Amino acid sequence: MRIAIVCYPTFGGSGVVATELGLELGRMGHEVHFITYSQPVRLALLNPNVHYHEVNVPEYPLFHYQPYELALSSKLVDMVKLYNIEILHVHYAIPHAYAGYMARQMLKQAGIHIPMVTTLHGTDITLVGNHPYYKPAVSFSINKSDVVTSVSQSLKEDTYRLLNIKRDIHVIPNFIELDKNTLDPHIPCRRSVMAENGERIITHISNFRKVKRIPDIIRIFDKIQQKIPAKLMMVGDGPEKEKAELLCQELGILDKVIFFGNSNEIDKILSYSDLFLLPSETESFGLAALEAMAWGVPVISSNSGGLPEVNFPGVSGYLSDVGEIDEMAENALKILSDDVVLCEFKKNALEVAKKFDIKHILPLYVNLYEEVLKKY
Ligand code: GMT
């Protein structure tokens, strides 16, 4: 199959999922074309089946907002024609489903009919898409997709609740590639950069937006470190980072917290971690938690959105109501205070992660592509 993938090329989960999906499809022999405004961060162009086409938006002083959707839909039309692309798969509804719909309309005029698969990732529905300013366009373009998928059952329910959607939504959970989870043996072990022997390593990775409840993470860690020796790894960047640094200073724990910023060494950090914190306000899935579990790292998370579909309480970690930082700290200590218990949770976290191995999930997308192509 010849598939175009549209996504956000940044560190966010939707871009990661889209990139890993495209790479795996390429390895299977499908021809994949990424169409976006810069090269996706995890896209290594080592596969002759995987192509990247940049969407350029010329700056013009008249425009207060540069028209990205326009440039994207034009690029889609050009690339579909040039490479005979058969399927359009857009990740994140805003504005990709809208631009995809426009591209299909233009292609139709030229006698080219191409199906569109839209994958909903979370904030495109729960935080942004249901805003009254966007809602009509988002609902319209989702309804005009041939296939709609969501990354969790919870997001599917949220989508029906928040938008006026008439289509079936297929739940296809996010995935990880477990085979990839081995560290390069030539790179020396550098756990010592993060913590002393005997200190537990606790990690959080995100885009540091309000929805991640960054202050909760700092406060949970503060409670943990009062009981056991521990360090906190804060990986990522975003609007809440500076506030978090100030809170650490206020609590007198700045020397126990490392702020890495955006890192390309996430695998290494996770491989040394003992616990992952994700107390988010809402999380359609929580790919970061799954990535941690794939490295055998148990998770303390909130129970919002799709998190209960990924993190199983008492098995791979614990769930609490949003904002219950005392309970989250207590649960963390239950896991971290005893080597045997920690070892058991680590083993279980990996076992749960195996359910989300790409080899189980990828065929679900391929089947949907095949089904929709039959109809065209
Ligand atoms: O909030 C983020 O971390 C970024 C956002 C995105 O669009 O990349 O993540 C969303 O999609 C991920 C991949 O499907 C999910 O794992 C995240 O849970 C989801 N974020 C939210 O729902 C807040």
Image (tube, rainbow, N blue to C red):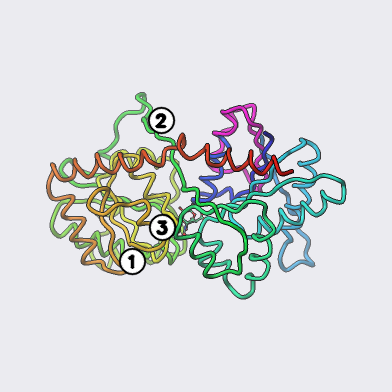
**Residue beneath disc 2:** 179
* Magenta stretch holds residue 299: no
For image coordinates 54% across by 33% down, the residue present is 24
Seen at 45% across and 63% down, the residue is 209
Q: Quadrant of residue 213?
A: bottom left
In this view, which residue lies farthest toward the top? 186
CA gap between label 1 and label 2 equals 34 Å
Vertical relation: 80 (above or below) 245: above
Does dot 2 land on a helix, a strand or a loop?
A: helix
Q: As rendered, which of 162 and 9 lies closer to the eye? A: 162
Instruction: Check disc 1 and give the amino acid type.
Output: Pro
Which sits in the foreground, 360 or 224?
A: 360
Q: Is residue 230 left or right of residue 61?
A: left
List x then y, in percent, for residue 298.
Answer: 27, 47
Identify residue for label 3. 306
Residue matched to label 1: 215
Q: Earlier in the sequence, mark 3 or mark 2?
A: 2
Magenta run includes residue 44:
yes
Q: Which residues, given as a range, are shown in magenta? A: 24-50
Residue 29 x, y percent position in the rendering: 61, 27
Residue located at (52% from left, 62% from top): 123
